[in-house]
């Protein structure tokens, strides 16, 4: 399997190189040159398999030239051994049509662990094959940061620099990052929004000298391996609800468009996905883009769902590329236009390509609260505000009653205790694995959100290439 950049001018690479590179050298994002295809029989054969075995079957076509099936199995077994639920990602029924897919049973209590625990293993395996050192630079609105740090803390051949928007992540999220004491972990709170942090990270990659000197790599969902690992749970859930005989719809609380793009990949591979519902909070660039073709960046409004307070969605570029006919040169021009003016219109081909599978909804604070109450009053489920955005959109979407609708539950409610308590009157306790979080000492620096300040900080601490 070879991978190509969405912007058409970076070299095609194999899986190992794509994983270590993160972002393509032309500023684009890597995608497989074609989608692997699963027949109805292949999908049926996933019935009854464990999560690890499902992961091996679903990911093998993507990694085949870089890992043997046995190696992949070994890495998945290690990655998912730290999840506290035997099913890894259990399905919970809410009513006759609605289900939650709980993705938050990993070490840092968010769906990011599903991909990042594996990515940590992949980095380690690939670096063991070469005499090299990686400098990871990442941006987080809360959850990627802690999951990535957990996955790479203490690894000898990796340094990680994680940027978060100062004051705009929950206390639990911040402490999960800043209380990890390992010599290779650097937390940076920047003055600005998540979009500012993400733009700084992309600029570091696009600075060819800087990027080569420190051998930069990515843990954000710009890294293809992140998305690949997330494709697995769409198969796992759909098969349990009747696929391939019965189609299944998914509602996904969305920010950077990574999680829901993994659902698109699953559909491209042959999984019968009836609908992908893109649920945004009031930071609704994706809802505007999908409903009206208007992808224009507004001011980020801080909300009770900070992990989705995003107005530039990295992975939307992957959809525009694939659904719009895979014209890298045209997309490079379109993205350059967006970077200059902060606005663009989707082409008709992009809109039509997306409309076949996606619908979208913008969920405000009241609807989010009502969804939390509905889940709590109806079935005793305490859900986090991000999952509630997904559930509210799922219930509004008008999906045919014969089709199960799975809302991805992306974070443990304890990560957002204040918002949960406000909505339900119940304060979720911190799970034992993070029980002493508020007793641990924090360590992070605050920097202005400028390229100069951040690169100077990284350059002083990162290991340059020999
Ligand atoms: C809890 C939670 N829900 C939803 C999202 C949005 O996911 P994505 O950025 O993949 O769209 C995030 C952050 O990515 C998150 O941390
Ligand atoms: N909500 C995210 C933002 C970064 O998203 P990613 O999936 O691209 O890493 C977060 O939790 O940090």
Image (tube, rainbow, N blue to C red):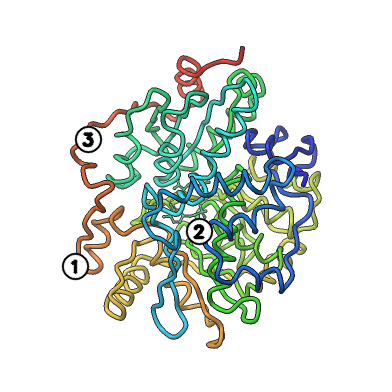
- Label 1 Cα neighbours within 10 Å, binned few <14 / some 14-19 / many ≥20: few
Mark 3 vs mark 2, CA separation in Å: 31 Å
Q: State whether label 2 is within 8 Å of ligand 1.
A: yes
Kindly tell me whether mark 3's CB lies below 8 Å from ligand 2. Answer: no
Q: Nearer the viewer, residue 199 or 272?
A: 272
Placement of 377 over or under 88, stated as above or below: below
From the image, tell me which residue sits under label 3: 440
192 vs 51, nearest the viewer: 51
The residue nearer to you, when weighing 206 against 336, is: 206
**Which residue position holds label 2?**
254
Q: Residue at x 69, y 71 (%)?
A: 356
Q: Distance of mark 1 from mark 3, alpha carbons?
A: 27 Å
Circles 3 and 2 in contact, beta carbons < 8 Å: no
Residue drawn at 39 percent across, 41 percent down: 146
Q: x, y percentage for residue 185?
A: 41, 28
Would you place residue 337 above or below residue 157 in this image? Answer: below
Q: Residue 379: in sight, yes or no?
A: yes
Upstream in sequence: badge 1 or badge 3: 1
Secondary structure type for disc 1: loop
Out of 198 and 267, give the one closest to the viewer.
Answer: 267
Tell which circle, 3 or 2, labels the residue nearer the N-terminal end: 2
**Residue 389 rendering spot, x and y as whole percentages:** 42, 66
User: In the visual, does 8 lie left or right of 81?
Assistant: right
- For ligand 1, tell me if the residue under mark 1 lies within 8 Å: no
At numbered mark 3, what does the secondary structure look like: helix, strand or loop? loop
Instruction: Give the SS element for disc 2.
Output: loop
Residue at numbered disc 1: 425
Which callout, 1 or 2, points at the residue further toward the start of the chain? 2
Residue 292 image-quadrant placement: bottom right
Which of pointers 1 and 3 indicates the residue nearer the eye? Answer: 3
Q: Quadrant of the C terminus?
A: top right
Residue 144 image offset from top left, x and y in percent: 45, 44
């Amino acid at each position: 399997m070879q991978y190509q950049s969405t912007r058409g001018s970076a070299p095609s690479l194999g899986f190992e190189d794509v994983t270590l590179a993160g972002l393509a050298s032309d500023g684009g994002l890597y995608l497989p040159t074609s989608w692997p295809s699963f027949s109805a029989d292949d999908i049926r054969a996933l019935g009854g398999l464990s999560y690890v075995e499902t992961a091996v079957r679903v990911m093998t076509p993507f990694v085949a030239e870089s890992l043997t099936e046995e190696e992949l199995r070994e890495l998945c077994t290690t990655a998912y051994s730290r999840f506290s639920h035997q099913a890894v990602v259990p399905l919970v029924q809410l009513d006759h049509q609605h289900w939650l897919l709980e993705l938050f049973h990993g070490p840092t209590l968010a769906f990011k662990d599903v991909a990042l625990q594996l990515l940590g293993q992949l980095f380690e395996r690939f670096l063991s094959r070469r005499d090299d050192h990686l400098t990871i630079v990442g941006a987080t609105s809360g959850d990627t940061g802690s999951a990535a740090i957990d996955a790479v803390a203490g690894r000898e051949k990796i340094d990680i620099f994680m940027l978060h928007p100062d004051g705009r992540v929950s206390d639990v999220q911040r402490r999960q990052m800043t209380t990890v004491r390992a010599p290779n972990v650097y937390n940076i709170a920047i003055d600005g929004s998540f979009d500012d942090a993400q733009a700084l990270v992309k600029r570091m990659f696009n600075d060819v000298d800087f990027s080569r000197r420190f051998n930069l790599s990515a843990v954000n969902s710009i890294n293809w391996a992140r998305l690949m690992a997330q494709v697995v749970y769409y198969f796992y859930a759909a098969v349990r609800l009747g696929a391939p005989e019965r189609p299944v719809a998914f509602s996904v609380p969305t920010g950077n468009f990574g999680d829901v793009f993994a659902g698109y990949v699953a559909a491209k591979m042959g999984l019968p996905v009836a609908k992908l519902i893109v649920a945004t909070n009031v930071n609704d660039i994706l809802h505007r883009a999908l409903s009206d073709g208007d992808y224009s960046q507004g001011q980020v409004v801080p909300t009770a769902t900070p992990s989705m307070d995003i107005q530039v969605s990295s992975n939307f570029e992957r959809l525009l590329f694939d659904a719009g006919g895979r014209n890298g040169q045209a997309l490079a021009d379109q993205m350059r236009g967006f970077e200059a003016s902060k606005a663009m219109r989707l082409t008709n081909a992009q809109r039509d390509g997306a409309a076949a599978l996606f619908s979208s909804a913008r969920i405000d604070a009241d609807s989010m609260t009502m969804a939390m109450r509905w889940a709590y009053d109806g079935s005793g489920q305490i859900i986090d505000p991000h999952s509630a955005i997904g559930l509210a959109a799922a219930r509004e979407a008008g999906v045919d009653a014969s089709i199960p609708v799975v809302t991805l539950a992306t974070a443990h409610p304890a990560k957002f205790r204040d918002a949960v308590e406000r909505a339900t009157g119940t304060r979720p306790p911190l799970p034992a694995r993070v029980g002493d979080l508020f007793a641990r000492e924090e360590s992070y620096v605050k920097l202005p959100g400028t390229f100069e300040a951040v690169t100077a900080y990284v350059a002083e601490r990162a290991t340059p290439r020999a």
